[in-house]
Amino acid sequence: MISCKPSSLEVVGETDEKQYQLAKSYQAQGRTDEALSAFLRVIDVRRDAPESHFEAGYIYLESLKDPISAIYHLKRYLQLKPGSPQAVQVGQLIETAEKEFARQLPAGPYEAELDQVDMLELLKGLRAENERLKRLLMAAEQRLAQYEGMVGGARRAASATESYAALTPDPELRRAESEPEPADVPRTYKVQSGDTLSRISQRFYGTPNRYQDIYQANRDRMASENALRVGQELRIP
């Protein structure tokens, strides 16, 4: 009987990630776009990347003047580190981003009180949408944990099936049990003339408010929310 000692795996912290350290190096050199890309790569491969969310949100707010993306990443930081000493500062940055968003809205020749009310209502709607996305994210993380458990069970079952197949004389049965199921194919959409992310969101989800989901799923293909090209292929999450 052979006994095997479980191997210990060293967990790499977010700030020890090579991409994170590379991003900080780019930041120090003033190479903002490259720093942002590196921070986003850390976010893509880690489920817990609060510091990268913070840095990305700050770059979006201060350098790229993209308050919507800034709000998204700063709020993700607060969700991941609600008790952080920086929580108050991050909350202030979110308020600044909301004001910047309101300032960027087109205004008519006469800015009446009604215009301000409309802006506040829009911001309330954005907050509600963010809360909805937060609930969806939590549900997705729970489903992911369930899937990971299912995958572990499936792997154990597959191992047992392979052992059984090795003892089964019937080659047809062995072949049928070992055939893999086809992988799911993600939805894609080719950009057409006149398309915007809101219109594409309306086409697939029945609402223009899911444009941010499409944008986040295609960050590696789009420099900004308005950087659509006719014929460009987008992922539809």
Image (cartoon, rainbow, N blue to C red):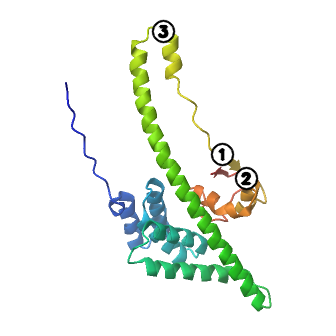
Percent of width and height locating residue 171: 48, 10
The answer to whether the residue labelled 2 contacts the one labelled 3, judged by CB atoms less than 8 Å apart, is no
Q: Who's the residue at 75% across and 91% down the image?
A: 113
The answer to whether the residue labelled 1 contacts the one labelled 3, judged by CB atoms less than 8 Å apart, is no
Q: Mark on residue 204?
A: 2
Report the amino acid beneath label 1. Arg
Tell me the SS state at disc 2: helix
Tell me the quarter of the picture where residue 66 sits.
bottom right
Percent of width and height locating residue 7: 25, 42
Q: Is residue 83 above or below residue 146?
A: below
Tell me the SS state at disc 3: loop
The answer to whether the residue labelled 1 contacts the one labelled 2, judged by CB atoms less than 8 Å apart, is yes
Farthest residue in the top direction?
169
Taking the image as shown, residue 163 lies to the left or right of residue 92, namely: left
- Foreground: 221 or 73? 73
Report the amino acid beneath label 3. Asp
- Foreground: 118 or 229? 118
Percent of width and height locating residue 204: 73, 52
How many angstroms separate mark 1 from mark 3 (CA)? 39 Å
Q: Please tell me whether mark 2 or mark 3 is closer to you in this view.
A: 3
How many angstroms separate mark 1 from mark 2 (CA)? 10 Å
Report the amino acid beneath label 2. Phe
> Which quarter of the figure is the N terminus placed in?
top left
Q: How many numbered circles does the render carry?
A: 3
Looking at the image, tell me whether mark 2 or mark 3 is earlier in sequence order: 3
Q: Which residue is mark 1?
A: 187
Q: Which residue is mark 3?
A: 170
Looking at the image, tell me whether mark 1 or mark 2 is earlier in sequence order: 1
Q: Is residue 140 above or below residue 135?
A: above
Q: Who's the residue at 42% across and 69% down the image?
A: 81
Tell me the SS state at disc 1: strand
Q: Who's the residue at 33% across and 59% down the image?
A: 13
